[in-house]
Image (tube, rainbow, N blue to C red):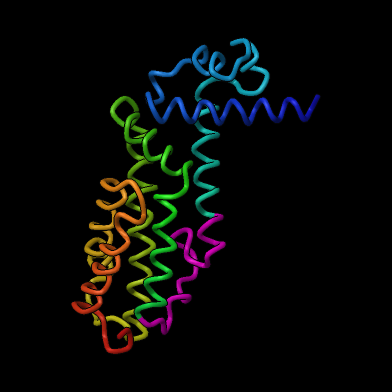
Amino acid sequence: MQEIKIKTKDRILSVAMQLFSVKGYHAVSIRDIAGAVGIKESSIYNHFKGKQEIFDTIIQQSIDEMAAYFVGIQVPANKEDNVSMYDGLKFDALYEKISNTFRYYFENENIRMLKNILLISQFDNPSCRSLYKRVFYDEPVAIQTRVFQRMMDIHMFRFADAGQLAVEFYGPVFAMIHLYDTFEDVEALLRSHLRLFIQCFGTEELL
């Protein structure tokens, strides 16, 4: 019975995420979720207090999954993490680190759905707008600010404002994540963006 309950709970989360990613949080009801799962509306409350708890669980699981992926490929998952894994990397190795990081935004279905959920829901829910900005812009820029500061400290980049470098590097990447469907669509563009960025701001240590 416990195993069935867990499976039902996971099914609710999976179906709700799909619905939210198409319609947004406010346009989906508990009745919609229950109907799509194939259970009674009242059965939802055996697993969750309501729609908000379902939504909050989906968001947290998606963020935790993304953090676990970044830890697994040995890149920073948040702005407090160590950034020394970039020390001494030449262009090809650096590109591999960066491409593996941003590939996730294209190839992981949950993060793609999370992006859609927050983009759609931000117009009705200020907290979704703040979360979207934090997950897809503020946190990546904060991490990259630390990376660029580290690279300047060890003379891989010429001295400049690390925060401004992060904004200038991530801006085009942010656009790629939102305007293209697959990583293959942006792979060559990302590589040329990194190469040009290094030519403009890097030192001979990177070349």
Quadrant in the picture for residue 91: bottom left
157 up-or-down from 134: above or below = below
The magenta stretch spans which residues? Answer: 68-90
Residue 80 belongs to the span the image colors magenta:
yes
Question: Residue 71: image x %, image y %?
Answer: 54, 61
| The C terminus - image quarter | bottom left
At x 35%, y 60%, the residue is 142
Residue 34: x and y in percent read 56, 15
Residue 38 lies, in percent from the top left, at: 60, 15
Q: Quadrant of residue 113?
A: top left
In this rendered view, identify the residue nearer to me: 91 or 204. Answer: 91
Residue placed at 18% from the left, 77% from the top? Answer: 200
Which residue occupies 23% across, 57% down? Answer: 172
Q: Residue at x 31, y 80 (%)?
A: 152
User: Which residue lies most toward the right here?
Assistant: 1
User: Which residue in the rendered view is the most extreme toward the left?
Assistant: 200
Relative placement, left or right, of 44 versus 143 is right
x, y percent for residue 136? 35, 48
Total label count?
A: 0
Q: Toward which corner of the image does residue 94 lie, by quadrant?
A: bottom left
Q: Quadrant of the N terminus?
A: top right
Q: Is residue 12 left or right of residue 92?
A: right
- For the stretch drawn in magenta, what is the main secondary structure? loop
Residue, far front: 184
